[in-house]
Amino acid sequence: MAKIEFDFKQFLLQKGEKVGLWTCVGLGVLMLGYSLFMPGKGFLSGSPGSNAKELEDISGQKDNLIASNRPSGELPEQVIDPRLRGTIKPPEPMVASFYALKSPLFTGAAGDDTRRNEPVVLTPAPDSIIAKPILVQLSQYKFSGKGEDLRVGIITPPAIPEAKKKREEQKKKRLSQGGGFPGMPGGMGGMPGGMGGMPGGMGGMPGGMGGMRGGMGGMGPGGGMGGMPPGMGGMGAMGGARGYGGGMGMGGGPPGMGMMGGGKAMAGSSGSKVISFVKTDDLDKHPNAVIAEEIHPATAVEIVAPFPLREQYRIVERALHLSDSRAVMAELEFDHFDVERRILLSDGKTPAPGSSWVAVDVKQNWAWKYVNGGRRTEPDDPELVPLLIPWSKGLAYPRLAQQETGRSSGKGDTKVSRYPKVEMDPPQIVKALEDLKKAGTQELPSINLRDTSGVDPSELLGGSEGNVPQMKNPPVVPGAGTGKPPPGGKLGPDGSPVGEKGTAGEKGYFGDKLEVPEFSLIRFFDFDIQPGVIYQYRFRVRVKNMNKGRTDVAYPEIADKKVLTSPWVVVPKPVSLPDEIQYFAIDLKNVDWKYNDDKGEERAVSRRARPYPEADGRRGQAAVHIQRWLNTINVSSNPKETVAETVGDWAMAERVLVYRGEYMGHTVKEKVVIWSPTEEDFVLASDPYRRGSEKTIIGVSFTPEPGYEDAILVDFDGGNIDYSRVAVPAKEDEPAKTKAVKDKAPMELLIMTPEGRLVVRDSAVDMENADAKARYIKWLERIKEVEAKASKENQGPGKGDPFSGPGGKGGGGS
């Protein structure tokens, strides 16, 4: 019998669907029959009543067992965990305040508990915070020594030796006795003193010819020759030590006396005024002395943010169960900030290895600069003042005073701040100012309101300021530490506001409504930063505990804290200082920048750059504009001597020609503006080894400090381009002609930085760089202003010299 072959694979291909379907149907019928006809299930499960009775019986049995259960002795040893043996301690009592909310979830009704709770401290929204680097010239007193030997510089006239004082007294005595015979009318009393400010310059020729029969000519106060032959006026000879012109000369006798016109000492000389250092405790012995000031170049980060003040008032009012906003204002006192920062990598996102959040004492750093600067602050924008006083007290640090003579719109006396105007950038601040303007003048509660710029440094320094000198007559700066109330108010004897409705405490003194701005201003500075480092900040707001030491609080622990703090808020945008040396693909011959000269007239920068030679692109030469921040500079051209002067400003290499493959750092001859403590003004730095017009030309190095690599111009393209273009012939049978074309394309510079990075500078982009343009225009205008001021003063009579003044004609002899 033949074996039947069965192809299972072919069978499934042909009948598989039906086999699967009927298999599922069979399994479904089997499961349905099991669920319906098994004992105790489906149709055989019994009635609902019998099932309920059965459950009740079981439940009753268990209840009876629980009620009648009694211990039956010790449990077996193996049941008890050895770690649980011993005396069982009762649980510690729970402290409700550990689990209490900082503020109630719902507003309490009239019959609720009115004990004071702890209010939540708010923070600004992260996306509203602005962080910006600043470079400023702070004004500070000139100090010497430390600790008990701390001395402060004062400006005084040059000291006169005792022997010279006696000679001068004898001369004055003889002159008062009318020495000499009367003469004929004297000649010109004195010509203006020549070169009064140069060290040991000639004193001028005061006196001229006296009378024919004049007596002995008096000796010029500048010191010099004694008596001249009769009739000859005394000559001032050498003009005193460093700065004094020659003194007055005598005509034929006392009536022929004329006074010379000594010129003012030139900038940088020490003849007209000198700085001496005295102990701070001895300042009272020098009532007429002026404290010497110097500039302190400072780099910092300014952080500004809008703080939700109105919402904070509501939270405090509910938590403390206060009646209204006026009561809140009397109790709420902000206590500045806790600030932390960390260092990021060059991507501006990743924390540097090993870098964590580190506390920064911004309050201490700010306070010492504030004290050393004579407790002076720079006034804020008048539009911003209504929000600062008093709403931002404890939240906004004042801006420290700068030692600067800026200029705006050609007006030489107008101060221009170096602080960036970022306070008005957040729209919340603009809206808050508009709300205050609509609210009008408000009468505020009877508390001691003062300008936020008058911060008490003893509070910031923990009550210890050291031996810091006080100005005898400090300059009055509008809105700076004057204790002014808000606009429209007055201060009473106790420092509280006094308005038209009466004095503080009288019935009806305050208005019915206190308009709290929706936002106030947060502003603080970090003066402890380094160039080339990327920082990220976070901070939290501090509020003095309004429940400190009180007994009417919800929980005793609330009264123990000294300050309350908000959650940390991270400044989203990292910040870093600009590079100290910056390179730009800018040729000043091609820019359309404008500046104002010393007369306020607008001039083109490109005209100023005309004398510069053209860059020769064929020889691999490109024009580069370089800007560098200078803290100090050596003004001496003598390589064996260093004469350091403080600058604290940007210096410009206006137009440097750099070859392909060459280091970009060059030394450029430029004029530099410095602060002169003796002149109490900004002057042009002078080289002590040069004379004439070359004296104020200083060699400024645009090379990095020793130990740092210089940038290299790797390659460039663009500039003046020459090429030939084929001209289309007028007729078909004419040959094609070539035409030489000269064109100019934007310059592109490929630069290798000291860090080894390749960067590209495009002239079309750099010429629109607002920061580079503003720095250059400010630098140029400032030099023009200082030059004009020096020229005007050198032409006029001397200042600060007791023997200076215009020369006059000698009087007639009698």
Image (cartoon, rainbow, N blue to C red):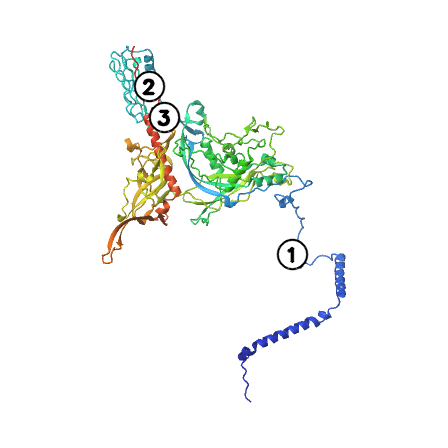
Q: Which secondary structure, mark 2?
A: helix
**Location of residue 164 by image quarter:** top left
> Can you tell which mark lies on residue 81?
1
Q: Earlier in the sequence, mark 1 or mark 3?
A: 1
Pick out the residue farthest to the bottom: 1
Q: Image height check: is 120 above or below 3? A: above
Q: Earlier in the sequence, mark 1 or mark 2?
A: 1
> Can you tell which mark lies on residue 164?
2
**Which quadrant is the N terminus positioned in?**
bottom right
Residue density around tag 2, few if under 14, some if 14–19, many if 20 or more, within 10 Å: few
Q: Disc 1, disc 3: CB below 8 Å?
A: no
In the foreground, 277 or 219 = 219
Pick out the residue farthest to the front: 731
Q: CA distance from mark 1 to mark 2?
A: 106 Å
- Residue of label 3: 273
- Residue 77 drawn at (x, y percent): 67, 58
Q: Amino acid at mark 2?
A: Lys
Q: Is residue 719 visible?
A: no
- Residue 388 drawn at (x, y percent): 51, 35
In the foreground, 145 or 528 = 528
In the foreground, 161 or 328 = 328
Q: Amino acid at mark 3?
A: Lys
**Location of residue 672 by image quarter:** top left
Q: Which secondary structure, mark 1?
A: loop
Q: Is residue 132 left or right of residue 745?
A: right
Q: Is residue 330 left or right of residue 658?
A: right
Q: Earlier in the sequence, mark 2 or mark 3?
A: 2
Task: Tell me what residue is drawn at x 51 percent, y 45 percent.
Answer: 126
